[in-house]
Image: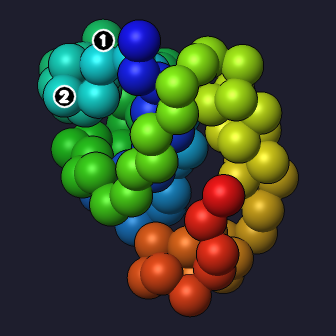
Amino acid sequence: MKWFVYIVECSDNSLYTGITNNLEKRILSHNNRKGAKSLKGKLPVKLVYKETYSNHERAAKRESEIKGWKREKKLELILGTVAQR
């Protein structure tokens, strides 16, 4: 099963990083107010970045790594100026 680490841009221009095994469904869930509670006041969200992993453990580790980054580094990743794993 494929797992995805993703970054969405919120309506207030903030960035949210998450993990899922069904990216399309997860983005729809966020925008239908059924996703993360922290996004409910920041809708709609737009997918701006994704990475694909072969298992949950690797994806979760990468999600944690990205969540620890400052906004500037996340923007560099989105723009392709930070190396992917």
Q: Amino acid at mark 1?
A: Lys
Q: Quadrant of residue 58?
A: top right
Query: Which numbered mark, 1 or 2, is in the foreground of this view?
Result: 2
Q: How many numbered discs?
A: 2
Kindly state the secondary structure of the residue where label 1 is placed. loop
Between 11 and 59, the one nearer to me in the picture: 59
The circle on residue 24 is 2
Q: Position of residue 70 (x, y in %)?
A: 76, 69
Q: Position of residue 14 (x, y in %)?
A: 49, 60
Q: Amino acid at mark 2?
A: Glu
Q: Is residue 63 left or right of residue 17?
A: right
The Cα atoms of the two marked residues, 1 and 2, are separated by 13 Å
| 84 relative to 25, above or below | below
- Does residue 10 appear anywhere in the picture? no
Between 47 and 42, the one nearer to me in the picture: 47
Between 57 and 15, the one nearer to me in the picture: 57
Q: Quadrant of residue 35?
A: top left
- Does residue 73 appear anywhere in the picture? yes
Q: Residue furthest bottom?
A: 81
The circle on residue 80 is none
The circle on residue 34 is 1
Q: Residue at x 48, y 81 (%)?
A: 80
Q: Residues within 10 Å of mark 1 (few under 14, many from 20)?
A: few
Q: Position of residue 20 (x, y in %)?
A: 44, 21
